[in-house]
Image (spheres, helix red, strand yellow):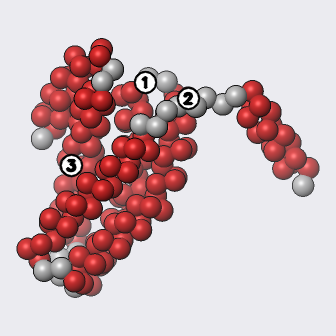
Amino acid sequence: LIAQALAAVGACEQIESVESPLARACTYGAVSGILVGGIGELWYRSLLKSFPGATYEAALRAILDLSLFAPVTLGLFVCAVAICERSDLEYVRYRLDKDWGHSIGKMWVLWGVGTTLSYLHVQPPWQPPLAMVLACVWHAFVSLRIHQPWQKATPRDAFRAQYLRDNRRNI
């Protein structure tokens, strides 16, 4: 799996000279395959070994996943995609600030509600297709957020930030 993802990144490097959406899709897919696919598989297996069962244990696994693994993976994912797009630390900070904190609440709502509905109302054979639909919606949202244009801070924004920092100290 990791070798295939790295091969996809190598193929994307040849496409990137065109600056096409295909290059962004390849990079996004490769990073997603390594982080979410590879590391996520190990995480879920360790959760299943630690908390085997289908009722309360399943709820505990979902809570642990959404509270520990998902925020960390989302932050790493945003950083990795930003680094693949541009090797600029300021850009990575900007993307992390704009996309990570903003998306965590939406992630908890989408996956929390989706997982709860899946466990309560969906038959087990239909749970993986529901998870696939949720994953497609989630990745479309994250891709839309990550690939928004970069707006560097203007001098006026820097002045506002300095003004707020100075006044915060006086309070």
Instruction: Residue under label 2, please give it.
Output: 90
Q: CA distance from mark 3 to mark 1?
A: 23 Å
Number of numbered discs overlaid on the protein picture: 3
Q: Secondary structure at mark 3?
A: helix
Query: What amino acid is found at the position of numbered circle 3 in the picture?
Result: Gly
The residue at which mark 3 appears reads as 37
> What percent of the width, then of the height, locates residue 26?
23, 32
**Contact? badges 3 and 1 (CB < 8 Å):** no
Locate residue 94 relative to residue 117 in the image: left or right: right
Query: Do the numbered discs 2 and 1 sit on residues whose CB atoms are within 8 Å?
Result: no
Q: In this picture, is 16 found above or below 157?
A: above
- Residue 114 in sight: yes
Residue 129 locus on image (x, y percent) = 15, 65
Q: Is any part of residue 49 visible from this angle? A: no
Query: For numbered disc 2, what is the local secondary structure?
Result: helix
For label 2, the crowd category at 10 Å Cα-Cα, with few meaning under 14, some 14 to 19 and many 20 or more, is: few
Which residue is at a point 36% across and 43% down the rendered structure image? 143
State the CA–CA distance, disc 2 to disc 1. 10 Å
- Name the amino acid, label 1: Arg
In the rendered image, the quadrant that contains the N terminus is: top left
Q: Earlier in the sequence, mark 2 or mark 3?
A: 3
Query: Of discs 3 and 1, which sits in the foreground?
Result: 1
Q: Quick one: 37 or 129, which is closer to the camera?
A: 129
Q: Residues within 10 Å of mark 1 (few under 14, many from 20)?
A: few
Query: Where residue 135 sits in the image (x, y, percent)?
Result: 26, 57
Q: Quadrant of the C terminus?
A: bottom right
Residue 155 screen position, x and y as percent: 75, 27
Residue where numbered disc 1 is placed: 86
Relative placement, left or right, of 71 versus 117 is right
Q: Earlier in the sequence, mark 3 or mark 1?
A: 3
Hey, which quadrant is residue 144 in on the image?
top left
Q: Amino acid at mark 2?
A: Glu
